[in-house]
Amino acid sequence: MMYLAGSIVLTSYLTLAFKLCEQYHIRIFPAIIFNYITCVITGSVVNGSFPVNAETMQTPWFRWACLMGVLFISIFNIVALTTQRIGVAVASVANKLSLVIPVVLSVYLYNETVEGWKLAGVLLALAAVTLTCYPNASDAKKRQGGRWTLVLPFLLFIGSGLLDALINHVQQLYVTETNKNAYLISGFLSAATIGTVLLLFQYITGRIPFSIKDLIAGILIGIPNYFSIWCLVRFLKTSPWQSSASIPVNNMGIVLFSTLVAWLLFGERLSKTNWTGIVLSVIAIYLIAFGDTL
């Protein structure tokens, strides 16, 4: 359960960190890129060496790691925008209710079952994400951001679901004790490479200046980010439950923990409709995880 607790706390920290970036006027995109560079360095230290080489690139999982890197950088930017424009709780729920996608795919890929209460949980999750993301009329940020901001949680829902499904698929088929760090570092390297090219272009063209604050923020986000994924992979590998239950349990903890901390630290206010969505999300995640035993 240590890996489960680590995944919950560290993943929640990442969402909350974007809220702090807004308060300290830190540019999100450079911070995200420095974060992935930090992930590569952190992973290499944990691994004892930089594991990506010509031999690594010939492995069957390397192309999946590259795709994971593309999803990493895309989803991280969407998480940041959702957190700053709508709130930590909404970002967390939209992000973690995406468990519907890997659960449904687990039926097709691994012959796991989704029926009865578990199926009810999947349907309830879709309603929950809609209610949680429903606009609050008193929320000035949403009005200023325009209606397009309401699309962000749904993009996050789809993207995060695909990422969870990818991580679960690769760890079931390819990840072992000997290559788990190489796989993670390859994914982070893919994100860092893409992001560095884009960031250098912005620096060279003068669109944004270099800031030491962005670098420091990237480091403070990057180290926990690496270990959040490391803990998730280890938890999925050692979990006593099927993946269709393990992912929901992990996500339920993240939703509850991040919402509570956002309320305590940032005083985030949610409407009754939003709170209804959060309560339904917890029920949905519980039904998906343990519906077979009810």
Image (cartoon, rainbow, N blue to C red):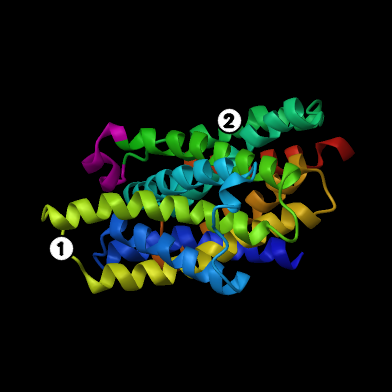
> Which residue occupies 61% across, 74% down?
48
Where residue 32 appears, as percent x and y from the top left, is 37, 58
> Which residue occupies 32% across, 48% down?
85
Q: Secondary structure at mark 1?
A: loop
* Residue behind mark 1: 209
**Residues in magenta?**
138-148
Magenta span dominant secondary structure: helix
Type of amino acid at the residue the image marks with label 1: Pro
Q: Secondary structure at mark 2?
A: helix
* Residue behind mark 2: 126
Q: Tell me how far mark 2 sits from mark 1, CA to CA.
A: 41 Å
Q: Nearer the viewer, mark 2 or mark 1?
A: 1
Q: Residue furthest front?
A: 54
- 185 or 17: which is nearer to us? 185
Instruction: Say whether residue 257 is left or right of residue 19.
Output: right
- Name the image quarter holding residue 52: bottom right
Task: Locate the N terminus and report the quarter of the image it occupies.
Answer: bottom right
Instruction: Say whether residue 196 is left or right of residue 201.
Output: right
CA neighbours of label 2 inside 10 A, class few (<14), some (14 to 19), many (20+): some
Q: Is residue 270 magenta?
A: no
Type of amino acid at the residue the image marks with label 2: Leu
Q: Residue furthest right?
A: 293
> Which residue occupies 67% across, 43% down?
170
Where residue 101 appears, as percent x and y from the top left, is 62, 33
- 223 or 198: which is nearer to us? 198
Using the image, tell me which numbered label, if any, was put on residue 47: none
Where residue 165 appears, as percent x and y from the top left, is 63, 38
Give the mark, 2 or 1, whose residue is nearer the N terminus: 2
